[in-house]
Image (cartoon, rainbow, N blue to C red):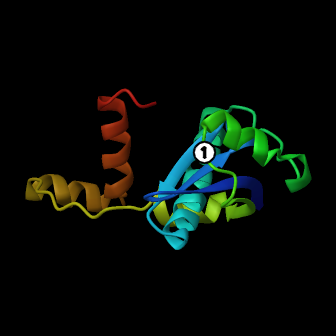
Amino acid sequence: MLSAYPACFLKEENGYSVIFPDLNHLSTCGDTLDEALAMAVDCLAGYLYWLQKDGDAIPEASSIEQINIAKITEELEVSPKQAFINIITVDVAEYAKNHFEKSVKKTLSIPAWLNKAALEQNVNFSQVLQDALKARLHLG
C-alpha cells in the first residue's frame, strides 16, 4: 500500500532540509535535491514502519493546500524564497523488505553429531538461530 505525505523542502546554504509537518515535524536533509528526495523517502518509510511495528496510530496526511509553508519557514527562521512542498510516496512494506528486514548471511560451526541430528529432524537452522537470539536478547 502506498503512503503519501507532504514534505517541506527548504533550500539552505549547505543543501536541503526536509520536514514532514504531519509527522511531528520529522526531518531529514541532503546535500543535493536528489539526495534530499531519497532521504525523505527513507525517513518517511522508517517512521511509518516503526509506528506500525510498535502498534502506534498512523497520522493522517494533510493535503498540500493545508500546509502553511510560510509559517514553517518563519518558525525555523529560514528564507521562504526557495522553499516548496512536495508529496513523498513510499510503499512501506516493500521498502522495509528491501532495506529494514534484509537478511544477512552468517557462517557458524556446530558439532557434526548435532548437525546430523538436526538434519534428521528437518530443522530450519536459520529459524532456530533467530528464535534463540531473540530469546537470549529478550526481544520477544
Q: Secondary structure at mark 1?
A: loop
How many numbered discs sit on the rendered protein? 1
Residue 3 on image: x %, y %: 75, 57
Q: Quadrant of residue 96?
A: bottom right
Residue 71 on image: x %, y %: 77, 39
Image point (31%, 62%), residue name: 104
Nearest the camera: 56 or 122? 56
Residue 2 on image: x %, y %: 76, 63
Nearest the camera: 40 or 107? 40
What's the residue type where badge 1 is placed?
Answer: Val
Q: Which residue is mark 1?
A: 78
Which residue occupies the extreme top position in the image?
Answer: 138
- Binning the other alpha carbons within 10 Å of mark 1 as few (below 14), some (14 to 19) or many (20 upward) gives some
Left-right relation of 132 to 78: left
Image point (29%, 30%), residue name: 136
Nearest the camera: 57 or 17? 17
Left-right relation of 55 to 121: right
Q: Quadrant of residue 77?
A: top right
The quadrant of the image that shows the N terminus is bottom right
Residue 126 on image: x %, y %: 34, 56
